């Protein structure tokens, strides 16, 4: 099949590249001509493991093309995939201007029948609006399909090629064989439903996963006060097949481009039909507050942060990505700077992206993780990159001004900490006090 993918962000680029592996010919389209030029040189605008190798292979084999000419790309394609951004407006609603503009452009470019497939995350009813916009711009026939994506940054290629399920929302049953053929080889678990239900499945899925994260973080906060260990609690919970172990890792909360945006959008979707989504509002509130437990533990261990030297490990919202959107690190570092702390930061991939969004004279950008820790009064681990797991903790403690480690992702075990001399705070586990091992829990401490 001949496909045009409108938008070369995470969803569009990964989807476009992966569809070529099924023998399809794909044109990835973007208005940003500099981005298209870089992609033509096999340079990905996003950090995603394996993406550049796939781009190079499919460019050389002639199945993949990049273009800024939407009109020509639509004309050459049987299926047009909408994968543009739908960022949050100040009130939490999804900003649909990009998808609406793209729909109008597609309508004006059509010179025959097309299937328009939406992979962008859009509120319920958006595909009907897309239909109206395209119909107002063309007299040619077309069909609309909703095929929301469920990829995770850092494992997006794997998630696209081997998904748990594929959701196809359509109102023309004749399209089902075409959609099954397009997704052939990815998975046999294809769920075909109506368009509005497909749109809702995406939001409901992300809202439920966000709820699991906020729930286990609330349990972690209680564990700190009663002396329990949330890692053992989560393990015991996860063995129940009705619950499962995924998304039960306590920490400083979720971030990124999906969960924060989609939870807020679903709250607004509910509000627009006069329903108050109380549970999801609490999920968002819990997540927002969870990241500030890092500050509470710093105050507990150091008192005033004025003039303190604080090391930060990790700026991306999760490992294996350079995405810093809604990263907990942003608010934590801003709070530290506001309190007059000197902040030394390190991230193996995301430092440049973070620095473009936020910089300050009190921030020192480090080239290696040890530099962020050396001479610091405390070190905060905010992203669980693999590189941090292999650090020699004895040398780490010896090089710090005060050997205080606040682990916001529960990376280290009791065995790794014992004997290092580190005063170790984690999330929802008993505090470990240097050479003495586990220390009794107290209210507000780990």
Image: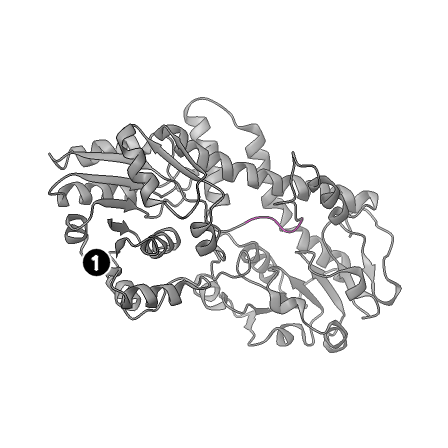
| Image: 172 above or below 347 | above
Q: Position of residue 169 (x, y in %)?
A: 36, 33
Residue nearer the viewer, 91 or 409: 409
Q: Main secondary structure of the magenta part?
A: loop
Q: In which quarter of the image is residue 9?
A: bottom left
The tally of labels here is 1
Q: Is mark 1 on a helix, strand or loop?
A: loop
Report the residue that reaches farthest toward the top.
274
- Would residue 3 be found to the left or right of residue 312 on screen? left
Q: How is the image coloured?
A: one colour
Q: Can residue 284 be seen in this view?
A: no
Circle 1 packing at 10 Å, graded few (<14), some (14-19), many (20+), is many
For mark 1, what is the residue? 68
Q: Where residue 47 appears, x then y in whole percent?
A: 44, 63
- In this view, 209 is above or below 303: above
- Residue 102, image quadrant: top left
What is the span of residues highlighted in magenta in the rendered image?
A: 250-254
Residue 319 placement: quadrant: bottom right
Residue 404 vertical position relative to residue 211 in the rendered view, above or below: below
Q: In this view, does 281 lie above or below 106?
A: above
Q: Is residue 369 visible?
A: yes
**Residue shown at the point (29%, 28%) measured from the top left:** 173
Q: In this view, does 119 lie to the left or right of 247?
A: left
Q: Which residue is drawn at 24% across and 33% down?
A: 131
41 part of magenta stretch: no
In the image, what residue occupies the spot 72% across and 61% down?
Answer: 412
Rendered location of residue 399, percent (x, y)? 73, 78
Estimate the x, y position of residue 293 in percent, counting from the top left: 68, 51
32 lies left or right of 317: left
């Amino acid at each position: 099949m001949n496909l045009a993918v409108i938008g070369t962000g995470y969803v569009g680029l990964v989807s476009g590249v992966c569809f070529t592996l099924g023998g399809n010919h794909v044109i990835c389209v973007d208005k940003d001509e500099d981005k298209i030029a870089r992609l033509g040189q096999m340079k990905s605008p996003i950090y995603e493991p394996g993406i550049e190798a796939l781009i190079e292979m499919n460019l050389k084999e002639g199945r993949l093309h990049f273009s800024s000419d939407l009109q020509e790309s639509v004309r050459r394609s049987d299926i047009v995939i909408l994968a543009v951004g739908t960022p949050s407006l100040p009130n939490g609603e999804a900003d649909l201007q990009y998808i609406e503009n793209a729909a109008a452009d597609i309508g004006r470019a059509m010179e025959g029948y097309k299937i328009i497939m939406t992979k962008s995350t859009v509120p319920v009813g958006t595909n009907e609006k897309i239909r109206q916009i395209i119909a107002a711009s063309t007299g040619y026939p077309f069909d609309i399909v909703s095929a929301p994506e469920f990829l995770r940054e850092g494992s997006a290629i794997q998630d696209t090629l081997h998904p748990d399920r594929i959701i196809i929302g359509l109102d023309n049953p004749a399209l089902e064989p075409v959609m099954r053929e397009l997704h052939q080889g990815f998975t046999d678990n294809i769920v075909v439903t109506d368009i509005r239900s497909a749109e809702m499945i995406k939001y409901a899925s992300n809202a439920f996963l966000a709820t699991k994260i906020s729930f286990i973080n609330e349990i972690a906060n209680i564990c700190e006060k009663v002396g329990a260990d949330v890692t053992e609690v989560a393990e015991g919970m996860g063995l129940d097949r009705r619950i499962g172990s995924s998304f039960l890792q306590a920490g400083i909360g979720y971030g990124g481009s999906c969960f924060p945006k989609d939870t807020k959008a679903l709250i607004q979707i509910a509000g627009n039909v006069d329903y108050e989504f109380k549970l999801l509002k609490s999920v968002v509130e819990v997540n927002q507050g969870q990241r500030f437990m890092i500050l509470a533990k710093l105050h507990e261990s150091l008192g005033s942060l004025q003039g303190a030297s604080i090391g930060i490990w990790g700026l991306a919202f999760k490992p294996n990505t350079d995405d810093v959107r809604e990263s907990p690190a942003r608010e934590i570092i801003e709070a530290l700077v506001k309190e007059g702390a000197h902040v030394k930061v390190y991230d193996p991939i995301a430092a440049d992206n973070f620095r473009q969004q936020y910089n300050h004279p009190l921030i020192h950008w480090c080239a290696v993780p040890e530099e962020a820790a050396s001479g610091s009064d405390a070190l905060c681990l905010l992203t669980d990159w693999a590189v941090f797991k292999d650090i020699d903790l004895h040398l780490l403690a010896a090089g710090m001004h005060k050997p205080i480690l606040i682990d916001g992702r529960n990376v280290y075990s009791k065995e790794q900490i014992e004997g290092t001399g580190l005063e170790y705070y984690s999330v929802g586990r008993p505090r470990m006090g240097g050479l003495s091992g586990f220390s009794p829990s107290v209210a507000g401490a780990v």
